[in-house]
Image (cartoon, rainbow, N blue to C red):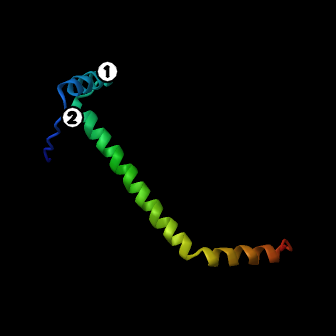
Amino acid sequence: MATLTYRTTDEKRVKLQKLAKSAGISVNRMIDEWATYAIAESDAFYRFQIMAENGKQHQGEAINILDSKARDKGMED
């Protein structure tokens, strides 16, 4: 396990301690949970970007399939 040093004001440290205590966890655990959440959000964002790019590459093919299905059902414009 790695150690990360975080510097903050005394006032913020006290507030973080109170917040952690109210949640029934340590400040370390609270910050670790925040970091986990931030990393998961970032990973999801980048996965979405990749999926969006892949979708753009196949957009024309998807439209052709939808048009073909519409013609098959007699739903064309």
32 in relation to 24, above or below: below
- Residue 14, disc: none
User: Closer to the camera, 15 or 61?
Assistant: 15
Query: Is disc 1 placed on a helix, strand or loop?
Result: helix
Left or right of 19? Residue 69 is right
> Residue at the location (57% across, 76% down)?
58
The front one of 13 and 19 is: 13
- Foreground pick, 9 / 16: 9
Q: Residue at image x 55%, y 70%?
A: 55
| Residue 71: quarter of image | bottom right
- Which label sits on residue 22? 1
Point 24% across, 34% down: residue:
29
- Residue bearing mark 2: 28
Residue 14: % across, % down:
22, 22
Q: Amino acid at mark 2?
A: Asn
User: Residue 59's image quarter?
Assistant: bottom right
Q: Residue at x 26, y 23 (%)?
A: 15
